[in-house]
Image (cartoon, grey):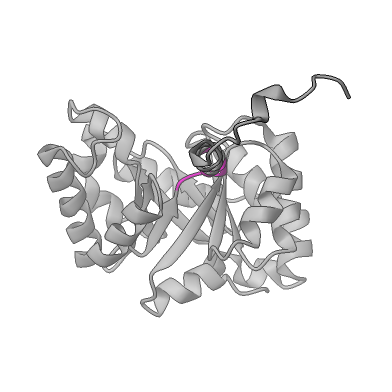
Amino acid sequence: MRKNELKQKMLRGERTTNGWLALGSTYSAELMGHAGFDSVTVDCQHGMFDFTQMLPMLQALSATPSTPIVRAPWNDPAIIMHALDAGAYGIICPMINNADEAAKLVQACRYAPKGARSYGPARGLLYGGADYFDHANDEIVVFAMIETRDGIANVDAILATEGIDGVYIGPNDLALCLGAKPGSDLTDARVIETIAHILNRARAHHKFIGIFCANGEVGATRRQQGFDLVTLGHEGSLLAQAAKASVAAALKAPVSANASDRSTGY
């Protein structure tokens, strides 16, 4: 089976970067996959697309060096198994609140005897290889998202769940559950302290930890703090930022004195 290079790097103690796809474009998937990210996540929770668009995005990522990950829309075994069968090499699952929900996530991601994933990898065989079944339980990486008050309270039990590779922080929902505003993960003391607490607990359990970041600058801070996986915004925000910067750069240029005298004819 094709090795999960993202998981291998994290096992070696390397800090990794993750791209994020929200637009539903196969071309965007190709661009992000070739941009230098260790992995790229297809966001089926808040992305502007459904499964029929997710599949070609995973196919596009297959031709790039990045490991393909899917964020499931919910802790639904049918959806999670479908994403894995489509070739996802990792699952990020939102709103995991306790050990029972973490165990349910593992059951959907692992074949027996470690789980209850139904056999039918379909495209997983094409991407992973003919011996996919023999190694999938070891290669697929599973992240439980911590972003609720219950998840924070039960983080140790979630991290102790067999088959959970790590936790992933959704800082905006985390901020909301703490009574703070989205985007305040670096400014609100409650959010800062809670993120540090989750990071420390992940380290204590020897599990991976990832986090969504607004941009590369925040990602650099999180890497220094010890996060294994940092997401550097999504391609929509990167496009918007680049477009605004380009317009701003053009408007800084002086306009020639006779520009207003140009003919309106063609």
| Residue 123 covered by magenta stretch | no
Q: Relative to 128, is 235 on the left or the right?
A: left
| Residue 237 covered by magenta stretch | yes
| Percent position of residue 69, x then y | 57, 53
- Residue at 60% x, 61% y is 35
| Percent position of residue 130, x then y | 77, 71
- Front in this rendered view, residue 92 or 77: 92
- Front in this rendered view, residue 244 or 111: 244
Q: Relative to 178, is 105 on the left or the right?
A: right
Residue 147 appearing in the image? no
Residue 240 appearing in the image? yes
Quarter of the image for residue 180 reads: top left
| Percent position of residue 164, x then y | 39, 57
Q: Relative to 217, is 85 on the left or the right?
A: right
The rendered magenta stretch, by its main secondary structure, is classed as: helix
Q: Residue furthest top?
A: 264
| Percent position of residue 29, x then y | 67, 50
- Residue at 18% x, 60% y is 200
Quadrant for the C terminus in the image? top right
